Image (cartoon, coloured by chain):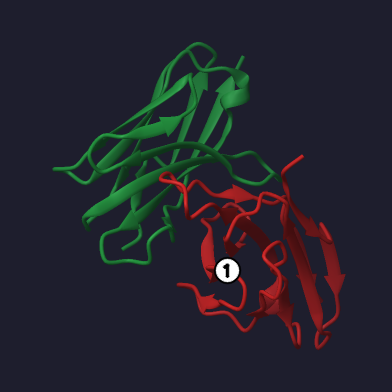
Chain colours: A red, B green
Amino acid sequence: EADIYQTPRYLVIGTGKKITLECSQTMGHDKMYWYQQDPGMELHLIHYSYGVNSTEKGDLSSESTVSRIRTEHFPLTLESARPSHTSQYLCASSDVQGHYNEQFFGPGTRLTVL
Amino acid sequence: QQPVQSPQAVILREGEDAVINCSSSKALYSVHWYRQKHGEAPVFLMILLKGGEQKGHEKISASFNEKKQQSSLYLTASQLSYSGTYFCGTDYYGGSQGNLIFGKGTKLSVKP
C-alpha cells in the first residue's frame, strides 16, 4: 500500500544529542517536504527537495539539515539538539508531475528536548 | 504573505453548516485545504486552481474568488467527524511552485 512513514513517532532526548528523524514514502513522489508545527499552530516549511540530490531551505529558518540520496527517503538531522527544537516535525510528499500537486503527510515525529 | 483565515474557531451542532474563509494579499495560483485532527497528520481535502478547476471531497465544497484572492470552504450538514483544525495553504505567483504557506487554522468543533 502506498504510504508515507515517519520514525520515531515520539522522541525525548537530552540537550546536545545528535538526532535523525526518518521519513520514507512508497508513492514514487519526486517532491518531499519537512514542516515544523508547534501545538495548535500552523505548519512552517523548513526543508524541501525536488528529487535525488536536491535539497532547499524553506521559509522558516532551521538548524536542521536534510539529505536526499534515494527518491523514497528524506531524513532530517539535528547535529546538537536544544530545547528550542522541541516541536512536531511532519514529512510530506507530492507528485510534481500531477496537475493538482496535493501533499500527503506522514504521521509526524513529536520531539522533546530536555 | 501568510494567508488570513477566519473565523479562528467555530462551534457547531451536528447538521449545521459552516463556512471558513482564507484571504490573501497576493495573487494566488492555487489554494489547498487540509483538515488536521488532534494528534494526527493533516489530511488533504480540496485544491482550487486559478481558473476554477478543483479537486476534492464529495461532501465538502469550496470556492475561489480570483478578484478578491479569497477562498471559502463550505461544510454542509456537519458531522461529528468534521471536528478538527482546518488549514488553508496558498501557492503564489512568483513563489516556489508547489510550496505552500499555511494560515493559522480554523478550529471546528461539532457537538452532538
Classify residue A44 as left or right of residue B39: left
- Residue position marked by numbered label 1 in the rendering: A51
Q: How many labels were placed on the picture?
A: 1
Q: Where residue A46 appears, x then y in whole percent?
A: 55, 71
Q: Which chain is home to disc 1?
A: A
Classify residue A14 as left or right of residue B102: right
B58 relative to B30, above or below: above
Badge 1 element: loop
- Image point 38% across, 61% down: which residue? B97
- Mark 1: few/some/many CA within 10 Å (<14, 14-19, 20+): some
B47 relative to A101, above or below: above
Look at the image and tell me in which quarter the N terminus of chain B lies: bottom left
Classify residue B6 as left or right of residue A105: left
A72 relative to A77, above or below: above
Look at the image and tell me in which quarter the C terminus of chain B lies: top right
Q: Where residue B4 appears, x then y in whole percent?
A: 33, 51
- Image point 58% across, 79% down: which residue? A62
- Image point 72% across, 50% down: which residue? A107
- Image point 56% across, 77% down: which residue? A55
Classify residue A69 as left or right of residue A97: right
Give the residue at the far left of this rendering: B67
Viewer-proximal residue among B25 and A96: A96
Given the image, on which type of amino acid does mark 1 rest? Gly
**Residue B47's image quarter?**
top left
Q: Where residue B44 appears, x then y in whole percent?
A: 54, 39
